Image (cartoon, rainbow, N blue to C red):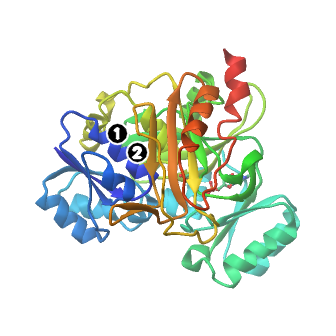
């Protein structure tokens, strides 16, 4: 069968690579793809992004099902359009995607269904927003309501910083419509984890746990980014916490959406803040929902999938997810992102990627911002590559990833040297 993956980042490269391992898959088309998907056997790039053109392509090529990677096409209603055209697709409808595309929708939903999250208020008026900030004090978090490509959240250490964020979002319109409304919320402390499940509207299949590194620099310093590296599993999520997250967050979310008349299909990604304490006393609060897989969390997660991934999606798009299971590699997968010069600001592009390690089952370089220019691989975006490895422990995975990075080169490359640091003491003490 032929499949279609929508998107062109590292997440989509990993998903397409994972799907192509299925014996029944002939070709995985990636729209628009990147320099890596252009070179991976069995994958083929399709230079399309318009929804009507993608529907025509899927019909012509008799695509068995489509998997959507990024949030933008979901928020634009790609799933509704494919379903209307009688095509199978995995992702949430435009209405369900509001869990990610509107922070205000997500917060109101969480409160309505008594799912734990930071206290908040929503504002459109800068004067009222600033008065609230001054009354609450710092630290405090300011979030643009709409999709802002990872640039919509300011964790402010001072009220001045928070008021500046208000001026930027509500004042000068630099985030456009996404910033026309802001959510101001309590600053939570603890350890962040990504908890991702697949859902077919009623049944839920949890994926392996993972943890991202949002800050640009080592020791979690520097600006927030889309994610500089991730690993799976995340030892912070013990089996007891796993059960609590399912019971306290995931089940109430899926049943709440169904009750609200907006059944959720697709990936539901809960960004969580886990407070300190024991597994029974630690607080679990929802920081955000995404209605897609994480990038770069997908890269290590997919490396650990031993089952036929295409079959899992096939069951999901036909409402039979309850019959699906995923067999996980017990090893740790760890991915380190190599970003371009000046990321997360406007990145440098067009640099030649002169060296790359050989791809193997234990070491894959998933591409994001790359392009094949007359056969030469060049940088074409902020996050360029994610070097992802599998190894027996986090420590070994870390060493293997950095050994592979030593064989990688493009001008201006920047990466963190401490991906996995939180899991190393935790993994060591749990064995
Ligand atoms: P979001 O897009 O909502 O996940 O926010 C991006 C990042 O900002 C999160 O991964 C956290 O690191 C941080 N963040 C968001 N909300 C809060 C909060 N209420 N308290 C502390 N940090 C937060
Ligand atoms: N890595 C965070 C995200 O995909 O939103």
Which residue is disc 1 drawn over? 18
Residue 75 appears in which quarter of the rendering? bottom left
**Residue 194 image position (x, y, % from top left):** 58, 42
Q: In terms of depth relative to the viewer, which is nearer, 27 or 316?
A: 27
Q: Which mark is residue 119?
A: none
Q: Could you tell me which residue is drawn at 24 percent across and 46 percent down?
A: 42
Q: In terms of depth relative to the viewer, which is nearer, 431 or 86?
A: 431
Can you name the residue that lies furthest to the front here? 354
**Residue 233 image position (x, y, % from top left):** 56, 30
Label 2: few (<14), some or many (≥20) within 10 Å? many
As drawn, is 320 to the left or to the right of 249?
left
Tags 2 and 1 in contact by the CB under 8 Å rule?
yes
Q: Could you tell me which residue is drawn at 64 percent across and 55 percent down?
A: 414
The answer to whether residue 174 is above or below residue 8 is below
Q: Could you tell me which residue is drawn at 29 percent across and 71 percent down?
A: 50
Q: Is residue 169 visible from the viewing direction of this image?
A: yes
Q: In terms of depth relative to the viewer, which is nearer, 266 or 386?
A: 386
Is label 1's Cβ within 8 Å of ligand 2? Answer: no
**Label 1: which secondary element:** helix
Q: In terms of depth relative to the viewer, which is nearer, 307 or 384?
A: 384
**Label 2: which secondary element:** helix
Q: Could you tell me which residue is drawn at 73 percent across and 32 percent down?
A: 282
As drawn, is 327 to the left or to the right of 407?
left
Q: Is residue 94 visible from the viewing direction of this image?
A: no
Q: CA distance from mark 2 to mark 1?
A: 6 Å
Residue 424 appears in which quarter of the rendering? top right
**Residue 337 image position (x, y, % from top left):** 57, 49
Which residue is disc 2 drawn over? 14
The answer to whether residue 414 is above or below residue 24 is below
As drawn, is 22 to the left or to the right of 378?
left
């Amino acid at each position: 069968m032929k499949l279609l993956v929508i998107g062109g980042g590292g997440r989509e490269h990993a998903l397409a690579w994972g799907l192509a391992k299925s014996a029944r898959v002939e070709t995985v088309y990636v729209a628009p793809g990147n320099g890596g998907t252009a070179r991976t056997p069995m994958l083929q790039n399709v230079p399309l992004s318009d929804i009507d053109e993608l529907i025509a392509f899927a019909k012509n090529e008799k695509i068995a099902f489509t998997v959507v990677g990024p949030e933008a096409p979901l928020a634009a209603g790609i799933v509704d359009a494919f379903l209307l055209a009688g095509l199978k697709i995995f992702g949430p409808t435009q209405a369900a995607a509001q869990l990610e595309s509107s922070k205000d929708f997500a917060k109101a939903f969480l409160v309505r269904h008594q799912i734990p999250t930071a206290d908040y208020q929503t504002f459109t008026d800068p004067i009222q927003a600033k008065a609230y900030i001054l009354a609450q004090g710092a630290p405090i978090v300011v979030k643009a309501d709409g999709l802002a490509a990872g640039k919509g959240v300011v964790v402010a250490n001072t009220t001045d910083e928070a008021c500046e964020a208000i001026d930027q979002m509500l004042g000068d319109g630099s985030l456009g419509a996404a910033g026309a409304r802001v959510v101001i919320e309590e600053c939570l402390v603890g350890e962040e984890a990504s908890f991702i499940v697949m859902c077919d509207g009623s049944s839920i299949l949890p994926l392996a746990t993972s943890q991202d590194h949002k800050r640009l620099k080592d020791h979690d310093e520097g600006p927030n980014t889309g994610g500089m590296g991730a690993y799976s599993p995340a030892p912070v999520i013990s089996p007891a916490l796993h059960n609590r997250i399912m019971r306290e967050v995931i089940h109430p979310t899926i049943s709440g959406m169904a009750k609200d008349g907006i059944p959720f299909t697709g990936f539901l990604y809960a960004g969580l803040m886990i407070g300190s304490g024991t597994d029974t006393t630690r607080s679990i609060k929802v920081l955000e929902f995404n209605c897609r897989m994480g990038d770069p969390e997908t890269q290590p997660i997919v490396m650990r999938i031993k089952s036929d991934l295409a079959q899992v999606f096939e069951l999901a798009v036909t409402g039979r997810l309850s019959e699906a299971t995923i067999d996980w590699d017990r090893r740790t997968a760890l991915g380190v992102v190599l970003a371009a010069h000046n990321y997360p600001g406007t990145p440098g592009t067009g640099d030649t990627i002169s060296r790359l390690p050989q791809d193997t089952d234990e070491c894959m370089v998933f591409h994001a911002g790359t392009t094949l220019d007359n056969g030469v691989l060049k940088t074409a975006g902020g996050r360029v590559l994610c070097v992802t490895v599998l190894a027996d422990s986090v420590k070994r995975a870390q060493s293997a990833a950095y050994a592979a990075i030593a064989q990688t080169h493009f001008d201006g490359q920047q990466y963190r040297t401490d991906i996995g640091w939180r899991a190393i003491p935790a993994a060591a003490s749990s064995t």
